[in-house]
Amino acid sequence: MAEIQLRNVSKRWGSFVGVANFDLTIADEEFLVLLGPSGCGKTTTMRMIAGLEEATEGEIVIDGRVVNDLDPKDRDIAMVFQSYGLYPNMNVYENIRFPLKVRKVPEAEHETRVMKAAAMVELEPFLHRKPAELSGGQRQRVALARAIVREPNVFLMDEPLSNLDAKLRVSTRAQIKNLSHELKVTTIYVTHDQIEAMTLADRVVIMKQGVVQQVGTPVDIYDNPANTFVAGFIGSPAMNLMDGDLKDGTFTGQNVTIQGLSGPNGAVTLGFRAEDAAIADGPAEIEAKVYTMELLGDATMITVRAGGALVSVKAHKEYRAEIGDTVRLSVPAEICHLFDSQDGRRIGAA
Ligand code: ATP
């Protein structure tokens, strides 16, 4: 059982603000992902929760108890890092058992608990190997098992998959998701990979330069990004963003005219997702020359220049066009998002 509250938590080093007024309640058993580019304050937020970094301001509350002055070891939190931190001279079994020894858990319980944790991450065949005799993915699983064996109240995971190759990352991600479903432990997971965030999270927190930009379920932030930063960070490809003018519900920009929108007259940024638009046979909202065509296997991505930017549309996998061909793209008002052209904040959708 662990609910975590961050009450207006800030971290400053001199005048530099690492994290600004982070205010959020993380529910018991929730899987929360902190997402954002390098240096946005994700790790610092997590280190403050763990007690490895002191909060300059605000309160950190675990299950109703303010823990700001509590040592990391007294917070009942298990951490998994990008660097596995395994002991090279101990075998897998001993590495997994180590936290039980440190915590003086009765010896009689060790074997059952180690074997249970090892089984959860499919490490039974490797218990006698040393870390040097394991692959990166297996080492990461030892680090996970060592966190699981403690049966903590909270898991903190800092980019645990970033040292793995692409394929292993996908399978280990699935394993983490399955584990969190089984273990039902409140988990805070840091990543800069938006696909990891979307696939793992109950809720995602998107940060930029120490400031929370949006908190929501993956579907919320994908469908209703709060600003252009979030729109441009989430999705693969990210949301197309074009600059232009809105006048009486009609958006106009280079190579683009979209009617039927609602929003204030003036300069705006208009966004739409590649998969929501389509290639048109007749006159359509965008008419432009093909900048590039990419075959993705399950679709063909067509990119053109419009509204001062490169914008992409996902076409049928058999669709073909040459670079320089003129194409028409259907971008109806219903799929469009509008953002303030100055501060990027969402101002509405059709
Ligand atoms: P990454 O994905 O690169 O790990 P992050 O989002 O986890 O990035 P943090 O490690 O939380 O970022 O760092 C946030 C900001 O605080 C960065 O600009 C970093 O340079 C700064 N910072 C971190 N630790 C210190 C420190 N001890 N003293 C001064 N500034 C620091």
Image (spheres, helix red, strand yellow):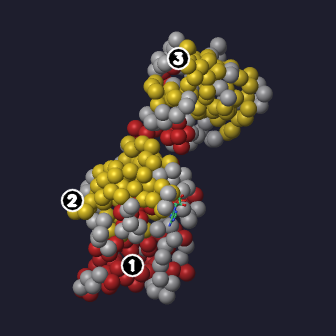
Badge number at residue 281:
none
Badge number at residue 265:
3
Q: Residues within 10 Å of mark 2 (few under 14, many from 20)?
A: few
Q: Residue at x 53, y 40 (%)?
A: 229
Q: Amino acid at mark 2?
A: Gly
First-in-chain label (2 vs 3): 2
Provide the residue designation for mark 1: 96
Badge number at residue 64:
2
Is residue 100 found left or right of 225 in the rendered image?
A: left
Is residue 302 found left or right of 229 in the rendered image?
A: right
Q: Amino acid at mark 1?
A: Ile
Q: Is residue 10 above or below residue 146?
A: above
Give yes or no for contact between labels 1 and 2 (Cβ–Cβ under 8 Å). Answer: no
Cα distance, mark 1 to mark 2? 31 Å
- Return the x and y of residue 181 as percentages of the image width and height: 32, 56
Q: Residue at x 69, y 38 (%)?
A: 294
Q: Is residue 292 above or below residue 203?
A: above
SS label for mark 2 = loop
Q: Name the quadrant containing residue 96.
A: bottom left
Quarter of the picture containing the N terminus is bottom left
- Return the x and y of residue 340 as percentages of the image width and height: 52, 29
- Return the x and y of residue 198 as percentages of the image width and height: 45, 47
